[in-house]
Image: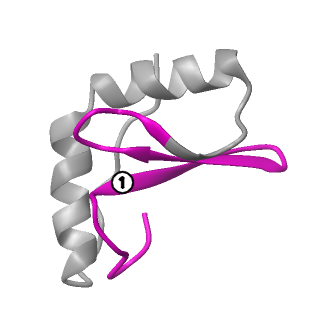
Amino acid sequence: MYYADHPPPHFHAKYGSRAGVFTIDDLRMTEGDLPPRVRGLVIEWASQRQEQLRRDWELARVRQPLLPISPLE
C-alpha cells in the first residue's frame, strides 16, 4: 500500500520484476501481469486477511503507520 493512494481500496503485490494491483473488497486484480499461480496465492493470502487489509488501507489514507500483516502459511 502507498500512503494517500487513490480509491478504490487496493494493495500492490510484487513477484520478482512483475507486479499486480488487487482490490480489497472483491480481491480482483485490476492491473499487472502476475502469473496465474502467483495470482492465486495472493488472492488466497488476501482472502484470509481482508479485515487487516481494510484497516491498513484506512491507516494509509491518513498517513499513519501500517500494522504488519502475516504471510501465507
Residue 26 magenta-highlighted:
yes
Instruction: Indicate the quadrant containing the N terminus: top left, top right, bottom left or bottom right.
Output: bottom left
Toward the front, the furthest residue is: 30
The residue identified by callout 1 is: 10
Front residue of 61 and 67: 61
Query: At 38% from the left edge and 36% from the top edge, which residue is drawn?
Result: 70
Q: Amino acid at mark 1?
A: His
Q: As drawn, is 2 to the left or to the right of 54?
A: right
Front residue of 71 and 26: 26
- The image quarter containing residue 6 is bottom left
Q: As drawn, is 12 to the left or to the right of 37?
A: left
Query: Is 56 situated above or below 47?
Result: below
Query: At 19% from the left edge and 51% from the top edge, which residue is drawn?
Result: 54
- The image quarter containing residue 52 is top left
Front residue of 59 and 71: 59
The residues colored magenta run 1-29
Query: Is 50 situated above or below 37?
Result: below
Q: Where does residue 14 sit, x and y in percent of width and height? A: 66, 47
Q: Where does residue 41 sit, x and y in percent of width and height? A: 54, 20
Front residue of 31 and 68: 31
Q: As drawn, is 14 to the left or to the right of 11?
A: right
Q: Where does residue 33 sit, x and y in percent of width and height? A: 72, 40
